[in-house]
Amino acid sequence: MIVFGKVFYFLVALGPLIFVHELGHFLFAKFFGVRVEKFSLGFGPKLFGKKIGETEYLLSAFPLGGYVKMFGEGGYIEGGEVHTSGGVDNAPVEEIPLNTLRELTEEEKSKSFAHKPVHARIGIVIAGPLFNLLFAWLIFIVLCMVGVPTVTTKIGEALKDKPAAKAGVQKGDVITAINNKQITRWEQIAEIVSASKGSPLSLKIKRENKVLTFTITPEPRVSRNPFGEKVNGYAIGVASAGELITEYFGPVQAVVKGTEQTLNVISQTFLSVVKMAQRIVPMDSVGGPIMIADLAGKMAESGGDIFLAFIAVISINLGVLNLLPVPVLDGGHLLFFLMELVFRRPIPQKVREYAQQIGMVLLLGLMVLAFYNDILRYFVNRQG
């Protein structure tokens, strides 16, 4: 039952993200007049399909992705030369045998992805990752309006022989202002102390029914950031009591806060990729479907708001990773299209084919690494 529950939440988390991603490609393809032949959730053998208009909508066997198959992807003949290419999101193109390729009519060219202006192809390709980022943004906005759990400024411990304790701060005190700036969240304390660069701070503290003022000089300290790197900073020596309150925001504030959170997660995701390339983040931290399923189950148990925030973070990860300039990913297609804009002609087919092959090897290697780490993390190491 536990495994079934995690698989269920994995599908609940991943399904909407795949749908939103492919919906972006689909809507922009329609906008630019491209015929969409297939819209599939999942890869591999078809489980269910229904054709509506010119598009067949599919549910496929492997729910780890999806694709939008557009007319003009795969292959055609023009000027006596055979043109073949991979599809957006690796849409299957092997269904068209080379011996059946033919010249397209002018009407067919008007609906072909490959024959659209480069700006249209860029718009279609970038729409998938962009929709993932917008989806996460909307989730964060909604969460801000329905209430965000926030750690208060109540002190759980004033560390012995540290600046706060020496000044007289005690367990149970509530910091209400620093340098006359009103604060309500614990994270604000760390931000202000860090920005002080060691300059004295004036803290207003509520103790029972009294309001007290203390002047505290932060001391230097070495800590570690989320990537395990040593960071020089400042601290006053207090620990949070872990008291939670729910903070609500109006529509305008929710948009501002949701935007800040979205940009922060995007930044952290890009930074994580860079740190991994620098080998600062170890490769064994890469996780695959098993890790995502495990996290999805744990987040769902923590509450609906936590689960939604988890979906938003995964959506941003999906959007950002798809924008990386790796052939076979959306970012790889974008790179070729941008080069086409610069050089004013398409990248030679052989170059694209070799790049696609290299990209596929890299992607398969990453998938193997993710599955290998999952097996070690959840089966081998736990048994040990």
Image (spheres, helix red, strand yellow):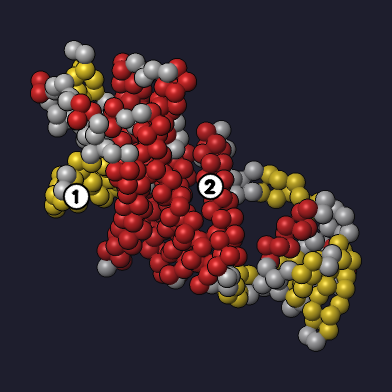
Circle 1 — which element?
A: strand
Apparent side of residue 94 relative to residue 319 in the rendered image (left or right): left
Q: Position of residue 365 (x, y in %)?
A: 36, 33
**Residue 122 in sight in this render:** yes
> Mark 2 vs mark 1: which is more N-terminal?
1
Is the residue 281 above or below the residue 165 in the image?
above
Look at the numbered discs 2 and 1 and tell me whether their residues touch, using CB distance below 8 Å: no
Q: Estimate the spatial distance between the alpha carbons at disc 2 and disc 1, rounded to whole Å.
A: 31 Å
* Residue at x-position 27% and y-position 37%: 34
* Residue at x-position 18% and y-position 12%: 80
Quarter holding the N terminus? bottom left
Amino acid tagged 2: Ile
The residue carrying mark 1 is 57
Is the residue 87 above or below the residue 243 in the image?
above
The residue carrying mark 2 is 266
Q: Position of residue 296 (x, y in %)?
A: 39, 60
